[in-house]
Image: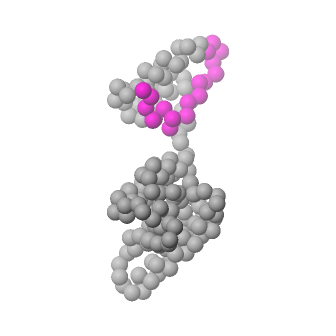
């Protein structure tokens, strides 16, 4: 079985005058990426570079999209977006029917207004905002100082479990961005 790291590391063979046949490359990659292999991602990258491969690191946006996709695997979450404090989309997997631009702008405004209200009332720091409608819930939470995580949730989802997962993902996003 292949490990998920294989997909994260984009691999390209360096062009040499006498390139190895492809048949020898595939067994090398299979041996390197088997589940039994206990090497870290960095060690695997070094091994690939020694073998003549060019290893391209994944970008922040690709990392954020994969983090958001993990969140959607929970079930009841239909889509989520990491947005800036100004309402610009950093990474999103919200359908175009929802209108991700308007959704992100209004979500940022909602968070900003709630934080200002809490500050004026001296009631502490904002954890999250939940908006209930007949068809969906919108859950917004801060993800560090630079981003906001907003998720569209089906109304019958287990709110406690969803909030736990959203908090974990918000922390991952904060670490990735900052």
Which quarter of the rendered picture does the N terminus lie within? top left
Side (left or right) of 150 relative to 163: right
x, y percent for residue 123: 35, 82
Q: Is residue 169 above or below residue 17?
A: below
x, y percent for residue 22: 58, 16
The foreground one among 48 and 91 is 91
Which residue is depicted at the point 45% across and 49% down? 73
Q: Toward which corner of the image does residue 159 lie, by quadrant?
A: bottom left
Q: Is residue 23 above or below residue 117?
A: above
Q: Toward which corner of the image does residue 170 lie, by quadrant?
A: bottom left
Which residue is depicted at the point 61% across and 63% down? 98
Which residue is depicted at the point 53% across and 39% down? 57
The foreground one among 113 and 135 is 135
Side (left or right) of 115 relative to 16: left
x, y percent for residue 26: 52, 19
x, y percent for residue 6: 48, 32
**In magenta segment, residue 17:** yes
Which residue is depicted at the point 63% across and 12% down? 18
The foreground one among 36 and 162 is 162
The magenta region covers 1-19
Q: Is residue 4 above or below residue 177?
A: above
| Residue 42 seen from this side | no
The foreground one among 16 and 146 is 146
Side (left or right) of 175 relative to 86: left
């Amino acid at each position: 079985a292949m490990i998920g790291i294989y997909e994260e590391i984009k691999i390209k063979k360096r062009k040499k005058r006498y390139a190895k046949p492809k048949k020898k490359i595939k067994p090398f990659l299979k041996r390197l990426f088997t589940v039994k292999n206990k090497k870290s991602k960095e060690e695997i990258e070094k091994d690939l570079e020694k073998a003549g491969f060019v290893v391209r690191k994944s970008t922040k946006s690709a990392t954020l999209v994969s983090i958001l996709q993990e969140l959607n695997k929970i079930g009841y979450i239909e889509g989520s977006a990491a947005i800036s404090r100004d309402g610009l989309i950093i990474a999103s997997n919200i359908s175009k029917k929802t209108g991700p631009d308007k959704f992100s702008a209004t979500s940022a405004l909602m968070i900003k207004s709630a934080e200002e209200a809490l500050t004026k009332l001296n009631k502490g720091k904002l954890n999250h905002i939940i908006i209930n409608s007949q068809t969906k819930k919108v859950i917004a939470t801060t993800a560090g100082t630079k981003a906001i995580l907003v998720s569209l949730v089906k109304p019958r989802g287990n709110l406690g479990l969803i909030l736990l997962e959203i908090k974990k993902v918000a922390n991952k996003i904060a670490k990735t961005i900052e």
